[in-house]
Amino acid sequence: MDIASNEDHPLRRLTLGQLRRRTSMKWRTHPEDVLPLWVAEMDVPLAAPVARALTEAIAVGDTGYPAGTAYAEALADFARERWGWDGVAVERASIVPDVMLGVVEMLRLVTGPGDPVIVSCPVYPPFYQFVTHMDRRVVEAPLGPGLRLDLAELEEAFARSTAGGGRAAYLLCSPHNPTGTVHTAEELSAVAALAETFGVRVVVDEIHAPLVTAEAAFVPYLSVPGGESGLSLMSASKAWNLAGLKAALALAGPAAAGDLARMPEEVGHGPSHLGVIAHTAALREGGRWLDAVLDDLAENRRLLAALLAEQLPAIAYQPAPGTYLAWLDCRKLGLGDDPAAAFLARGRVALSAGSEFGTGGEGHARLNLATTPEVLTEAVRRMAKAVG
Ligand SMILES: Cc1ncc(COP(=O)(O)O)c(C=O)c1O
């Protein structure tokens, strides 16, 4: 693969044969006859500037511990350029091993053992697993109509969680995984106002933010009125497919700087130095490659909608601009709570089981559309055959 030219249609470049040489989770969890459209890895070649930065690091043996603030500086410039937001301050940013471990560390700063952590379900399954594993309690506040944040549900959950006078946090996913919903400035401001009213601390996972199209306008939570006391996790990991190159950034709003300062220094020893190099290169030089991915994803969303309308009209799919994941409402297919199990067993297509995303996920499946049109087309053909 010529890495210099891979800014042209990154999602059209790799064959199944090339992809199957990968040894990551997406490609090694299921047997070879299964098409994997589940875990959030993209079927793209590495962006050329990232590959170059890593190759140079390897060439000089730059494989020690991470140092400095280059990642935060790169994110600050990216945020200014892409989102018109000047709010990433290096002195209020810390590197963390990855987004989920960063979430855990942020929750540790603002809650204690046994405290409630509110989530808007259905939501990314590790929100449940990591929160439970760190000895906090998950409280569900389901999404409302149109798969958007339900402020009444949130108010009720915030009130219930703080009724005894204890501490509570809201773990917000923005944009939302699995639905791809991009929260508006009004919604986020309303969340901040509710959080202020009830004394709930907001930790926001913004890992999918660079994948939001310009028209859909991602709004950083820390930028909205009242967001100053928020803690955010950002990363180049999803948008540039760098999950294997561990690194992420924890950001504090001005009023949460003291909280972030209490994070133990050792947490910053966890990210990989090569990860920090890769993420920094992605944010600094990977803009054109990302734009090309976003164009391909827009095409794939249209393709998926057309294929479903034609072959599986009983599935409800609302294309959403917040990520490369598609949330499929399969309840009318009569496949029970776990349609993904039927698609796997009868169609040899691996999707993510909706029930793992908490209340509201039953009867749904999540499909990863960051693949080639050929794979997407074949996947829907197999799904249709599985229920035909
Ligand atoms: C919402 C969300 N948060 C976190 C992660 C995982 O990020 P990391 O590998 O940096 O922990 C994912 C991965 O898909 C995700 O979708």
Image: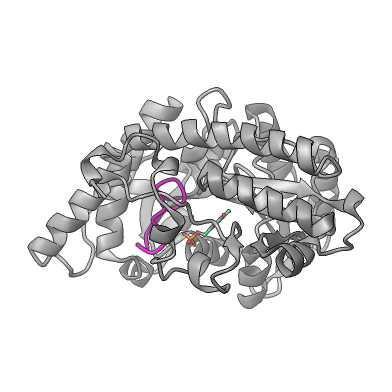
* Left or right of residue 91: residue 315: right
Q: Is residue 137 magenta?
A: no
Question: What residue is drawn where x is 48% and y is 43%?
Answer: 253
| Up-down relation of residue 294 to residue 243 (above or below) | above
| Up-down relation of residue 25 to residue 380 (above or below) | below
Q: Residue 286: percent from the left, percent from the top?
A: 31, 39
Query: 170 and 256: which one is in front?
Result: 170
| Residue 74, quarter of picture | top left
* Residue 72 visible, this orientation: yes
Q: How many marks?
A: 0
| Residue 343, quarter of picture | bottom right
Q: Residue 358: percent from the left, percent from the top?
A: 77, 61
Question: What residue is drawn where x is 57% and y is 37%?
Answer: 300
Question: What residue is drawn where x is 40% and y is 65%?
Answer: 97
Q: Residue 174: percent from the left, percent from the top?
A: 60, 43
Query: 245 and 186: which one is in front?
Result: 245
* Left or right of residue 151: residue 211: left
Most frequent secondary structure within the magenta stretch: loop
Query: 92 and 300: which one is in front?
Result: 300
Q: Which residues are magenta?
A: 234-249
* Left or right of residue 287: residue 332: right
| Up-down relation of residue 111 to residue 298 (above or below) | below
* Residue 200 visible, this orientation: no
Q: Is residue 244 magenta?
A: yes
Question: What residue is drawn where x is 50% and y is 45%?
Answer: 372
